[in-house]
Image (tube, grey):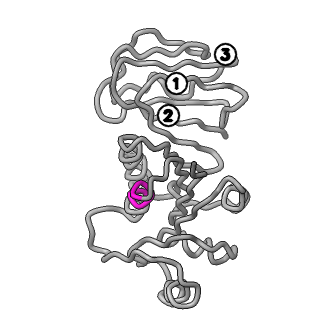
Amino acid sequence: MSRRTVIVSGGLLEEEFALPILKSEDTEFIIGVDKGLTFLYRHCIKPDYIVGDFDSVPRDLVDYYREEINVPIREFNPVKDASDTEIALRLCLDMKRKEIWILGGTGNRIDHLWANVQCLQIALEAGADARIMDSHNRIRLIDHEIVLKKEEAFGPYFSLFPLELPVDGFSISGAKYPLQNHFLRPSDSLCVSNEFEEDEVKISFSYGKVILMETRD
């Protein structure tokens, strides 16, 4: 069974958070995506694959990996129909990777963040567990009942948002703000910044897809 695959994109990359993940024994495969390649090079971390249009990376850096290090590269025209992160995610799925962490998927560009959140649906539908992470956030997409354990929580807060359509029969138990059989709409901010009340929080709903954000200050 394959271990964790990490996609290193060109957004926010914090050394204290990202480096332990990249150097962990649990990380088996690393994909450098466009500007994220600069971060990997600076910290002497060799990617297993490189993806992007490389409009934000020095040309000699790409040539270095191609010619001297011999890392497989998928280069795309900047005028394309998918983001670099989506292309990297689809590559993971083609290789049957099931646990995928995306670093550098957040940052100043909210449009890039939202595109990355939407990309999580591609992984979910392929049966993979993909998540976007930085030092303050862990973002996942769920389509079934889930139990969060306080001892394993990423942070003290969690928020939930329907991805596309309203979610019926939405319930939260074990939380500071419980909810029972609610019709949760995409425009509803009711489920922002909830907290653990008990050791376990149960989230359930009848159908649909829900964005789960676990956060800390």
The residue wearing badge 3 is 197
Q: Could you say which quadrant of the image residue 92 lies in?
A: bottom left
User: Which tag, 1 or 3, sits closer to the chain's start?
Assistant: 1
Q: Marks 2/3: CA distance?
A: 18 Å
Q: Secondary structure at mark 2?
A: strand
- Magenta residues span 89-94
Label 3's element? loop
- Would residue 65 appear left or right of 217 to someone viewing this image? left
Residue plotted at (57% across, 52% down): 2
Count residues near mark 3 (Cα–Cα under 10 Å), then give few for <14, some for 14-19, many for 20+. some
Q: Between marks 1 and 3, how big is the CA–CA gap?
A: 16 Å
Using the image as rendered, state which of residue 87 and residue 79 is in the foreground: 87
* Amino acid carrying mark 2 in the image: Leu
Q: CA distance from mark 2 to mark 1?
A: 10 Å
Q: Which disc, if any, is residue 212?
A: 2
Image marks 2 and 1: residues in contact by CB distance under 8 Å: yes
| Badge 2 or badge 3: first in the primary sequence | 3
* Farthest residue, direction front: 1
Q: Residues within 10 Å of mark 2 (few under 14, many from 20)?
A: some
Q: Residue at x 62, y 74 (%)?
A: 46
* Residue drawn 65% across the image and 49% down it: 135
- Placement of the C terminus among the 4 image quadrants: top right
Residue 47 in magenta stretch: no
Q: Residue furthest top?
A: 180
* Residue at screen point 56% across, 56% down: 5
The residue that mark 1 highlights is: 146
Q: Position of residue 170 (x, y in %)?
A: 41, 17
Instruction: Specify the amino acid type for callout 3.
Output: Glu
